[in-house]
Amino acid sequence: KPLFPDIFPPTSSSSSSSSPPSSSTSAFCPSVSSSRHIVERQPRMLNFRVEYRQRTVELVLEEGSTVGEIKQILETELAVPVSKMQLKGWKSGDVSDSTVLRSLHLPKNNSLYVLTPDIAPTASTSKNSLQESLNQNFLLIISHREAQRDYSLNFPGSRTIQEVKRNISDLTNIPVRHQQWEGWPASASDDSMTLAVSGISYPCHHLSVCRRSSPANSQEPTEEVRTYVHMVSDSEGDDFEDASEFGVDDSEMFGMGSSTCRKSPMMPENSENEADALLHFTAEFSSRYGETHPMFYIGSLEAASQEAFYGKARDRKLLAIYLHNDDSVLSNVFCSQMMCADSIVSYLSQNFITWAWDVTKEANKARLLTMCTRHFGSVVTQTIRTYKTDQFPLLLIVMGKRTSNEVLNVIQGNTTVDELMMRLMGAMEIFTAQQQEDIKDEDEREARETVKREQDEAYRLSLEADRKKREAQEREEAEQVRLEQMRKEQEEEKEAIRLSLEQALPPEPDEDSAEQISKLRIRTPSGEFLERRFLGSCKLQVLFDFVASKGYPFEEFKLLTTFPRRNITQLDPGSTLLEAKLFPQETLFLEAKE
């Protein structure tokens, strides 16, 4: 008797005699009876993205499928025999072809890669893709199992496996010779290989690392469950019992033995010109870590400070001083992973003036301390002195203030991209608040200066108007004086002429003279009459001189007869009064010439 009774009541004979569900991968199972259908639960579907030598294959399979079925599909798609195919990227390590996908508890979306160590790449494939792979960036997601922490690191395809391991040594404090790795493909048999030819997945590859307990315990895994453990030693035997067997310089163990770093220093020693030193630094930085890096200011620290602090408030920026030291184990990781990260480069370029200096050489360090003392004071200099070599590189964030410059933050080399970005953003918040106050003060000051300039301009224009008015008045007065002077001179001249004419007139003849006498009566424009006796033999000129002596010059007035109307001034001045028929008497009148 069963322990538990049936939950459901027995079905009819037709139901009990129905055949079991089909093993097909179809989502539904057909029923025996045409009048009734029994619906099965739809199986879960899994998505796979498989990478192989610059090719990508997208697959969708039921979780009831096996690993071998995936390989059979890939054999058709990639033309690679199943026997020479290694399917990698499983979270749980290598699996057999008979493993059912359901047992692996996979997520809906999965990334795998195919390795074919027994099949060499074709010449055409190598030629076309090698340079492209060297220029690509590979994202390595490296799990530090002991610390239970994942590192997401970007490396160019030209970086070697040895350099990756050294960077991880800096981050995890696990010497390269004690590192035990999982996830490297079988083709990555030499640590001098570049990532581009190592066979890792692009664009992302998962690895894990831990500290090897003892070199003697490390054995090569079997071919069936290959985990590709790589152990490399980079130290001498001074401090480690088993280091002598490797024969490698101790400096390489800490990431300083790279030939790239030793070929040329970041900055020449005792360079006379700071701009030349910065040009050399920028070129060497690009050579080591690639062209994607902050735009370093080429010039003196004083010029960089002027550029950052002393412009318009809206244009000011923070000053980021990067201090490099090749003797620090953190330099390579900090430069390649922090200073060359796209987000950091973009943020520094938009908000900072970035100035750099190499303090590896004591002479260059002493020169830097002198510059810092001159521009920022002894406090900043003493702060830099307190940091030891293994705490470099340093990134000093300096903000310009009204009275002095303030170091907001000193970021050491043992940080992450996220922490670095947070500290940069924190400094930016402080700077933005100060900048808004400076902008407000500057706007108010400019407004006051604008009002003052407008008032000064109005006052200047008023003074100018008064000056012009005064000058015009002075000119007018001077003109009046001049005209008055001219008038007086003309009057004096006229009076002199009049007097001379009056004196030159012949005497008036007596009324009872025996000679013929003409008596003339002349009416002036004012209504007065001039009367005088003239000899009939007198010339008309004498008459004209008489009229002029009375203030009516010949040039301005004409002398007319009443009837018939004649203009006497048009007659010949040499003719006599008798000839002009102004005898024995005549009434004339003066009229101004037009």
Image: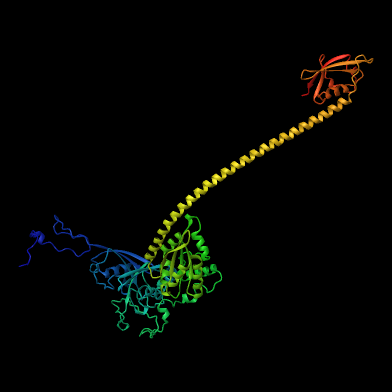
Q: 462 or 200, which is in the foreground?
A: 462
Q: Residue at x 8, y 62 (%)?
A: 6
Q: Position of residue 467 (x, y in %)?
A: 63, 41
Q: 180 or 261, which is in the foreground?
A: 261
Quarter of the image holding residue 274? bottom right
Query: Is 288 on the left or on the right of 578, as rendered?
Result: left
Query: Is 262 on the left or on the right of 91, as rendered?
Result: right
Instruction: Name the colour scheme.
Output: rainbow
Quarter of the image holding residue 504? top right
How many numbered marks, from 0 up?
0
Q: 309 or 244, which is in the foreground?
A: 309
Q: Position of residue 231 (x, y in %)?
A: 35, 79
**Quadrant for the N terminus in the image:** bottom left
Q: Is residue 88 above or below residue 585?
A: below
Q: Position of residue 71 (x, y in %)?
A: 30, 69
Q: Does residue 584 appear anywhere in the picture?
A: yes
Q: Is residue 281 above or below residue 540?
A: below
Q: Does residue 156 appear anywhere in the picture?
A: no
**Quadrant for the C terminus in the image:** top right
Query: Is 184 on the left or on the right of 500, as rendered?
Result: left
